[in-house]
Image (spheres, grey):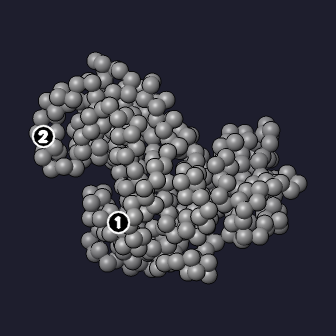
Amino acid sequence: MPSLSRTLVATARDRASKLPIVTVTGPRQSGKTTFCKAVWANKPYVLLETPDVLARALADPRDFLDRLKGGAILDEIQNAPVLLSYLQGITDADPTPGAWILTGSQHFAIVEGISQSLAGRPAMLELQPFSVEELREAFPGRELAEHALNGGYPRIWTGGVDRSSWLADYVMNYIERDLRRIVEIGDLATFLTFLRLCAGRTGQVLNVASLGEDAGVTHTTARRWLSALEASYVVHRLPPVHRNVSKRLVKSPKLHFLDTGLACHLLGIRDANDFAFHPLRGALFESWVVSEIRKARIHRGLQPDLAYYREGTGREVDLVVERGLDPIVVEIKSSVTAPLDAAKALLPAVETLGRASVASRSITKRVVYAGNERFSVQGTEFVPWNGLDRVAWS
């Protein structure tokens, strides 16, 4: 089994050298436990999903933490939020950097608990499944279709499991173990229909009313379920550009699955041939690129700061990286042949964003496509699908 290094390691060590608590969130099965055990190998490890361990933590939090003198890795901290209040006193008395490492799979629950009990104390990091950058060295020569179909979950790449079976189990375990703790589902079949409809809308402007109607649920239920999917790192709502511009811009977010392997599984796409000819191939590629760029940023400790640009007339740019006065605009095309005319699609956003920020020094223009060559044409950089490392942070 190949061992893959994670880009987040350097950021995690840096944060742990400065703050007493480091919190690592991310989807279930993204590799958080393996990551934390590797980075902080000398620390005791405590899994707060083990029934007897969790019972002790909830029954006597102070004694539980006192037995872990010097700190520990507390895995799945959202199961015992009461510990956060006690950690406040412990770290006030002994603010040794990197003493306590917390992990969890429910972003909103963890952030809410930390904001109430540990405001200002922890570093907040996010570990997503493997990126193409992390996979490239261990699995050279793999094609785009394999990356899109597999997604990034470590077990699929390194665990020797059948992809379809593992993803089917993941969906059911995710619903049973995580989602029902966040939101009431009711009819499981209806929710699975909703989840598949979300997969069918990846890479598209989100219309919650239409989504709810197609799933047979109310607008309120659809919004609640979407929030739960986002809280557990299944989907991401990419906001529209919010700059002060004179043009009428679309105000609804775009919906993106964070893992295209999961999206492809829900859509019944099972092999490279299915992927190549599926009508949603372009949308899935767009979601894959957005997710990869997001990973490249958050694994380096950067805020995602991602948006998209769409005018009321329909003119659109797939991705805008809000980099202060110097944004990066990115057009995403699933063609293998370099789409030279795609550079023109960037012009409306470049013109509008340039006028909105008169102090802007430069707007970087990039086209990401499914080919293999990197080159520049008249100020626009064309970036191959497997070379995304620096697209959104330099």
Residue 81 in the image: above or below residue 340 = above
Residue 225 in the image: above or below residue 116 = below
What residue occupies the far right of the structure in this picture?
378
Quarter of the image for the N terminus: give it: bottom left
Left or right of 64: which side holds 331? Answer: right
SS category of the residue bearing label 2: helix
Marks 2 and 1 in Cβ contact (< 8 Å): no
What residue occupies the far front of the structure in this picture?
1
Q: Quadrant of residue 377?
A: bottom right
**Residue shown at 81%/61% (left/top)?**
343
Residue 351 in the image: above or below residue 87 = below
Q: Quadrant of residue 55?
A: top left
The image position of residue 273, as x and y in percent, is 58, 80
The image position of residue 106, as x and y in percent, is 35, 51
Q: Nearer the viewer, residue 2 or 287?
A: 2
Q: CA distance from mark 2 to mark 1?
A: 29 Å
Left or right of 276: which side holds 345? Answer: right
Residue wearing tag 2? 56
Crowd tier of the residue under label 2, counting other residues whose Cα lies within 10 Å: few below 14, some 14–19, many 20 or above: few
The image position of residue 5, as x and y in percent, is 49, 45
Left or right of 186: which side holds 367? Answer: right
Residue wearing tag 1? 170
**Residue shown at 30%/37% (left/top)?**
73
Instruction: Please indicate, yes or no, whether residue 199 appears anywhere in the rendered image.
Output: no
**Residue shown at 62%/62% (left/top)?**
141
The image position of residue 321, as x and y in percent, is 66, 48
Left or right of 29: which side holds 242? Answer: right
Crowd tier of the residue under label 1, counting other residues whose Cα lies within 10 Å: few below 14, some 14–19, many 20 or above: some
Instruction: Please indicate, yes or no, whether residue 151 appears anywhere in the rendered image.
Output: yes
Quarter of the image for the C terminus: give it: top right
* Residue type at tag 2: Arg
Nearer-N-terminus badge (2/1): 2
